[in-house]
Image (tube, helix red, strand yellow):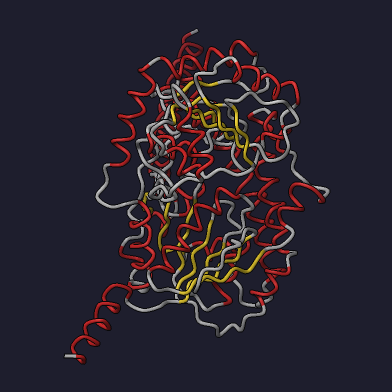
Amino acid sequence: MRLKFIFFVYFFNFVTFGYGANILFLSPLASPSHHNWNRNLYLAMVKNGHNVTALSPDIDQDITENLHYIKLDGVYEGIHNSSDDAIDMIDFAKASEWQAFKVFWHYCTVNNHLAAKSQGLQTLLNYPDTFKFDLIVMDYTIGGFLIGFLHKFRYPPVVAVTAFSVPHYFTKTFGGHRQPSYIPHHGSRFSDSMTFYERIINQIYYLIDDYNYHFKFIPDQNELMHEMFKYKNLPHITELQKYFGLALVNVHPAVEQYPPLPSNMIPVGGLQIVDPKPLNPEIKSFIEAGKQGTVLFSLGTNVKSEMLDDVMKKMFVSVFAELPQYNFLWKYESDLKISLPKNVMIQAWLKQNDILAHKNLKAFISHCGLMSTQEATWRGVPVVGMPFFADQRRNIIGLVNRGTGIELDVFTLKRDEFKAALLEILENPKYYENAQRRAHVFQDQKEKPLERAVFWLEWAMRHKNDFHIIQSPVQVIGSFIGNGYDVMLFGLAIVVVFILTIFKCYQKFCNKKSEQKEKLN
């Protein structure tokens, strides 16, 4: 009987986990929200019996068995403080859409060059080339030189992930088809219903981004990769990209329109959303004390509330004081130094996932980052959006068009406008009703997004030699042929030749007629 029991336990573990694999996560982007998204993958894979090594600028203070962090030290400090190329987030937010393209790729380049200088990178580079990783998972949001580890560790299966929707360069890498006629560029202010003029501008945005990516960013990253990975036979970075077997992308139609995905791009939108945990008693009591409800105010992790000017902060507090029927829970990262009314609480860190799930949470004042937008949509909470940069503008426009949000410009915002927007979102039931409908659509899935992501990561290890079965043919033939541009050009050439032939014939006919007239004269 004992032997049967031991066999059953062994068999169950084998069927459930297959084996305890060694997995390398490469997550170079310095962004706490992206780290939170990636961390859910780390923890889920550890829970399934695997060993995870994560190269990242972010690490957790809590120790998790079988999760080992290698910190990319100095990346945050360089981006925000000490580097000559430091990025001022408020200046980034004030940049025009045209300027924002340059700033975005500058941010990506600076981030990766700082990662290349870190001691953490050297630690992983010092691993023996024979060290066996069963899977490499790379956060390819900002692309980059770290794909050189694929060559170093002798080409295990590699999967790309991104919390940043479906970046258009992802679509090309994985053999998809870009749809600029109804998919607004992430840096635009367009919706999925664009005018003819907007479609022209949107196409130009994509072309500018293509230029920056293919002719500036990729050459820079290829040079950096060859500088850091000193192998004579190291391929070009674009050749290494072809080894990606599949991609996990952070999209769901309840939140945004996205282009048709090839079979090797798996939608896992909202995987960071987990079952709510019990709230801190003080915060829970404050939320429940709001007579008509409580409002959460958070500007995310890249732009902090403390970065706003003092006039703006005082305006927020004065408006909150005039709405005593509601409580306001504000994520503020330092000492506000303003006398607060009883209905306002500030906290340096708030567990957004858990707070949005509370039944007395009636609205969310947000910067409208994608993950915050997804979490509000999943919980059915209407949004007052104050976007700053990147996809945040596109996200709030989506909420406005769906009737679940109101947009405000934080740099021109007036007191009365802010108060009116709050009252509209809180007291007009249409916003809550629309948000609840979206929530039901988002939640109605056969498995949780995180479970789907884990399945496909383990699938990649089980079928490491058969990626070609699910890969798009466009990955092989290229987007030029895959989109039929060669056939269109051939057809255009035939039309041009035909027109030129007709024109030549007409010219000859006219010349002949002219010669005959001259002879008659």
Task: Determine the image quadrant of residue 450.
Answer: bottom left
Residue 288: image x %, image y %?
A: 45, 32
- Asked whether 508 or 457 is in front, the reply is 457
Q: Residue furthest left?
A: 1
**Residue drawn at (55%, 60%), measured in percent from left and top?**
238
Q: Is residue 278 left or right of residue 228?
A: left
Q: Residue furthest top?
A: 521
Work out whether 58 lies above or below 50. Answer: above
Residue 208: image x %, image y %?
A: 61, 37
- Is residue 167 visible to us here? no
- Asked whether 488 or 409 is in front, the reply is 409
Work out whether 337 lies above or below 88. Answer: above
The N terminus - image quarter = bottom left
Q: Is residue 312 left or right of residue 282?
A: right
Residue 384: image x %, image y %?
A: 51, 24
Task: Determine the image quadrant of residue 298.
Answer: top right
**Residue drawn at (46%, 57%), measured in percent from left and top?**
40
Q: Is residue 364 left or right of residue 348?
A: left
Task: Determine the image quadrant of residue 492.
Answer: top left
